[in-house]
Every structure is written in C-alpha cells, then in structure tokens.
C-alpha cells in the first residue's frame, strides 16, 4: 500500500515531469490584461529620453529611474520583477495612450498602442504592469537571457482544476489563507498578483476553480514543508 506521503511525492514527481515536457508560452498565450497602469502627460520632452529603448522594464533600478523622472516625488510602487514586468510606451505631444496586448504561441508579447492627436509640446506616457509568465520577447525584442519565465528549467508551471478553500487558518498562521484541493492533495495559493482575486476567492470558496501558476516549496516552522502555487491565472472552472 502506498502511504499518503509517498503518494504525494509521486504526484509532485508527475507534476515535475509534465512541467518539463509541456511547460512553455502556449500555456499563457492569449490577451494579456494589465495588473496596474500609470498614465500621464509631461510638458518637458527631455525626460522622455529615460524611456527604455526595449519598450519594457524588468529590473528595479530602471523602474525607479523612469518613475522618478515622470512621476516626481510620488512613492515608487513596489513591483516583484521575478513575476512581473512593466511595458512602456510614449507618444509626442500632450496625448493620451491606449494599449492592447496579446501573447502569441511563441512567447512574443505584441503591444499595440493608439493615441489622441493633439499638437503641442511635451509627451504622453503609459506604464503598464503585466505578468511576465510565458513572455520571451516584446514586439520581437527578447528579454534578457534567463529573464523569461517560460525558459527557466528550474521552475515548475502547474495547471490545476480543484476545489477552492478560502479563509483557511492553521497553527502559527503559516498559510496564505487560500488552498486548492485535488485528489486529496492540498496546495496553498498565493493570489497576490491580482488584488481582485482575493475577493473572488471568498465568493468561490467551496467551488471548483482553474488555476495556473508556479509551484514553489517553502519551509514552515510548525507545519513542515509548504507547497505554494504563485498564481498567474485564476478563474471558476468552466466544466464544473
């Protein structure tokens, strides 16, 4: 008879194997929605030069430089660049920018922008935070080597359909407060990538959901090893 611990190890081994042969941009292909965005118009065109030529930001130093140049003394928002990235767009004149983004099957994030047509000095800008999962390039410009999530051989991507539990309490508070259970295996969910997901999780607790994300292991104090999925996509299960 296979004990519960051995059974769990076998399931995780299976996940590792599947991630190794199936992981890739196709998991995340489709329309990409912003997590957050910041837009504005500046009358001084000189500061436009700080915009990265690549059209995206994947590090804190560049992010802080651009933010301070365009947003002044406003506090620099915290961004987890391991998980997220910022798309940058500018346009001449005091114009507002609209953006649409889609990730293709090869991992290229296609960014299309449109803007108002007002003449005058200055420039308009848009800073858009998106999930980096599956992105290999932006408008054909590759991310730095090792920076594209989909290529990382030591990262595990999972796609799970299971029963959601929200408001979970354990000894010592060692939990994200949200779990998904599948085949008697319970995994914690980190929903911090999208502020709306926590509210949705409260409404969906006890129901079937579909989640995609990165599987990680964290050492607990009272509860031993914790398996946590850093969620990239979260939705009710469409085939419940």
Image (spheres, grey):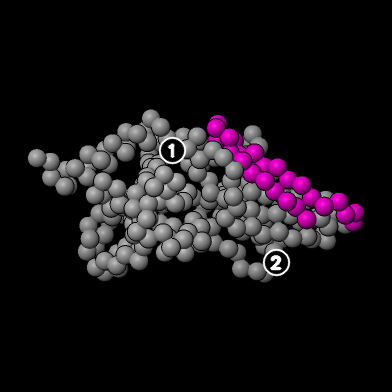
Residue closer to the observer: 87 or 231 = 231
Q: Is residue 76 left or right of residue 112?
A: left
Q: Are marks 2 and 1 in contact (CB under 8 Å)?
A: no
- Return the mark for residue 233: none
- Dominant SS in magenta: strand
Label 2 secondary element: loop
Residue at (51% x, 61% y) in the render:
196
Q: Is residue 34 left or right of residue 167?
A: right
Residue at (48% x, 41% y) in the render:
149
Residue closer to the observer: 140 or 201 = 201
Question: Measured along the vertical axis of the image, is residue 10 above or below residue 97?
Answer: above
Name the residue beneath numbered marker 1.
152
Residue at (46% x, 34% y) in the render:
24
Q: Where does the N terminus fall, quadrant-wise?
A: top left
Label 1 secondary element: loop
Q: Is residue 105 visible?
A: yes
Circle 1 Cα neighbour tier, 10 Å, few/some/many (<14 / 14–19 / ≥20) = some
Q: Is residue 51 left or right of residue 169?
A: right
Q: Is residue 117 magenta?
A: yes
Residue closer to the observer: 69 or 111 = 111
Residue at (47% x, 38% y) in the render:
27
Cα distance, mark 2 to mark 1?
36 Å
Furthest residue toward left = 1
Mark toward the start of the polypeptide (2 vs 1): 2
Residue 185 picture location, percent across and down: 26, 49
- Return the mark for residue 72: 2
Residue 6 picture location, percent across and down: 16, 43
Residue range corresponding to the magenta coloring:
96-120
Q: Is residue 106 magenta?
A: yes
């Amino acid at each position: 008879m296979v004990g519960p611990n051995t059974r769990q190890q076998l399931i995780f081994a299976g996940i590792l194997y599947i991630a190794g042969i199936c992981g890739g941009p196709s998991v995340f292909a489709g329309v990409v929605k912003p997590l957050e965005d910041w837009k504005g118009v500046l009358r001084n065109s000189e500061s436009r030069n700080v915009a990265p030529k690549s059209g995206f930001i994947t590090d804190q130093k560049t992010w802080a430089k651009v933010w301070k140049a365009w947003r002044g003394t406003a506090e620099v928002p915290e961004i987890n660049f391991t998980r997220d990235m910022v798309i940058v767009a500018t346009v001449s004149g005091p114009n507002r920018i609209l953006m649409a983004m889609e990730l293709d099957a090869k991992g290229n994030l296609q960014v299309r922008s449109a803007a108002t047509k007002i003449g005058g000095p200055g420039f308009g800008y848009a800073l858009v935070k998106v999930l980096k999962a599956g992105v290999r390039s932006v408008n054909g410009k590759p991310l730095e080597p090792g920076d594209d999530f989909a290529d990382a051989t030591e990262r595990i991507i999972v796609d799970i359909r299971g029963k959601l539990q929200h408001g979970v309490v354990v000894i010592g508070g060692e939990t994200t407060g949200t779990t998904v259970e599948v085949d008697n295996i319970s995994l914690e969910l980190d929903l911090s990538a999208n502020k709306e997901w926590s509210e949705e999780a409260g409404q969906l607790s006890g129901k079937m959901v579909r989640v995609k994300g990165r599987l990680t292991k964290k050492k607990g104090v009272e509860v031993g090893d914790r398996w946590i999925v850093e969620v990239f996509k979260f939705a009710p299960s469409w085939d419940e």
